Image (spheres, grey):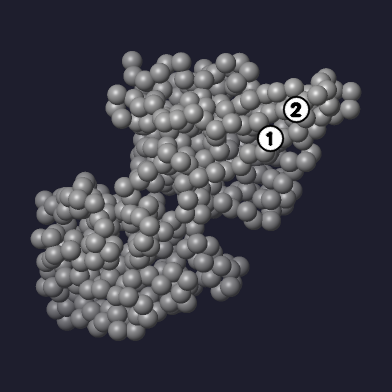
Amino acid sequence: MALTIRDCQFLIKSFRRFGSLRRLVESILLFYPDASILIADDSLGPGLEALPGDALWCQRQPNVRWFQLPFDCGLPAARNYLIGMADRPVVVNCDDDFVFTDETKIEKLLDVLNHDPSIGLVAGVMRQDGRVVNYTGQFAFAPDGGTRSVASSPPCRRLTIEPNPGPPETTPAGTRFVRCDLALNFFAARRESMLRARWDPRLKVSWEHLDHFLEMHRVGIKVAYTPDVVVDHHQDRSPEYLRFRGRKSEYTDYVLQKWRLAGPPNHSLEPERWHSSSSLSALRSPLPNIVVLAIGHSGTSPFTAMLGRLGWYLGPVDEYAELPFVRAINDRLGTYLRPGESRDSFRRHTERFLRELRQPWAIKDPRFVHTLGQWIKLLEPYKPTLVWLQRPLDQVERSFLIRREGTVRDGEIVSRGKTLRELWLICQEHYDRWPWDKLTVWWPDVATTCATIQQLLSLAGGRLAGHRLLAAAEIYRPDHRPGSPGWAA
């Protein structure tokens, strides 16, 4: 029978990057709500005696099985443990600083495995610093004139990593794939193949990648990658993490002697030559980042979902197209900080969050009505376009009443201490003071779709593909509520 997403388990090795880990888990569950996720963590030890809140959040998710391993047991040992604990035929290997997006289609990885049963592992490609890159090639060995990698070792050979031949093959379903010997550590693999080619537990970090693919080559496991599946890579290089990650030199002699190599191959991340994308992020002309401003119940959820369909990056949003991190920031701005948290620390965390958002992004939160002025300095490097979504106040009031939200004071709806008219005037003040490009969108135009699409088209320089326009237009459906395929606020 053909493999499906239900045959997969997502395996994550975690070490002291719990904010990144939570972001990855949130993104997996956004696109695969029923995913089975196995996490192996070896963080607890010197300098960290208890797991922080983001790790505890991951543990509480019903889809997650958490395994606490001995401190610094290493990436290979932890991944071998996860393979042993997996109980489904396909494992999806993820680094803890990956983020799934609408381009991370695990089904396409499975399509390649279904197309060619002889392939044991199929990888995707990675977006890093705005570029789609890959770490791939074919192994080529040659004698090295009798030199030694380590004194008293057997005669050495030179390893070079040659380019993969092209063009890609294509499955009947249209997924392109390239046969190779080396690929990224983002892959779907048959569990039985991973049981045949385990990671070397004598390694901790760094060399384990090349070593594992050399082992698969040695035992005859066929490898491929597809340029049609992209995962985002948001590198977390904190000093604490790098102190343990940067130990490559400790294992160099061991790896070279193990594989009888004269030296390490000269190979690194390179732009992926076969990748193509219909996403707006692939267009040459830069598109604006967007901040959506509106009173609650003004239609920001379907409007922001439209932006996502058109190619703007939304991140791991909830059913209201809101990022939990943005909501948490706005809840804390001007009110309170967490115990032990300084203003500088809060600012640094927010700046880091914005740096890690893939551009062009779009963010929304009705709380911006109260906090937007405090975001200006943080947003300066990105100069986003402000989109003020306006809806007739009688419709907003009716929506509040239907959902039994807000309070009624002197016959008027009050939200967060302000009447709807007061909130409208605050939005007007934010709009007038906005220092960069800005745009107003009228909710009835969103309802009829066409006028809104024309305005969004102007933001994108007139380069939105027709199929994306249709996908965005399908978002508005007055018979649905938030959380369904289409909805009206």
Q: Taking 1 as reference, is 54 left or right?
A: right
Amino acid tagged 2? Leu
Q: Which quadrant of the rendered structure holds the C terminus?
A: bottom left
Residue 229, x across and y down, in percent: 40, 38
Q: Residue 420 occupies which quadrant of the picture?
A: bottom left
- The foreground one among 29 and 154 is 154
- Verify CB contact (< 8 Å) between mark 1 and mark 2: yes
Q: Residue at x 35, y 55 (%)?
A: 283
Q: In the rendered view, tell whether residue 211 sits above or below residue 448.
A: above
Q: Residue 196 occupies which quadrant of the picture?
A: top right
Can I make out residue 343 in this image?
Answer: yes
Gap between marks 1 and 2, in whole Å? 9 Å
Residue 138, x across and y down, in percent: 57, 28
Q: In the rendered view, tell whether residue 322 sits above or below residue 218.
A: below
Q: In the rendered view, tell whether residue 432 sits above or below residue 451.
A: below
Residue hosting label 2? 261
Residue hosting label 1? 265
Element marked by disc 2: loop
Element marked by disc 1: loop
Amino acid tagged 1? Pro
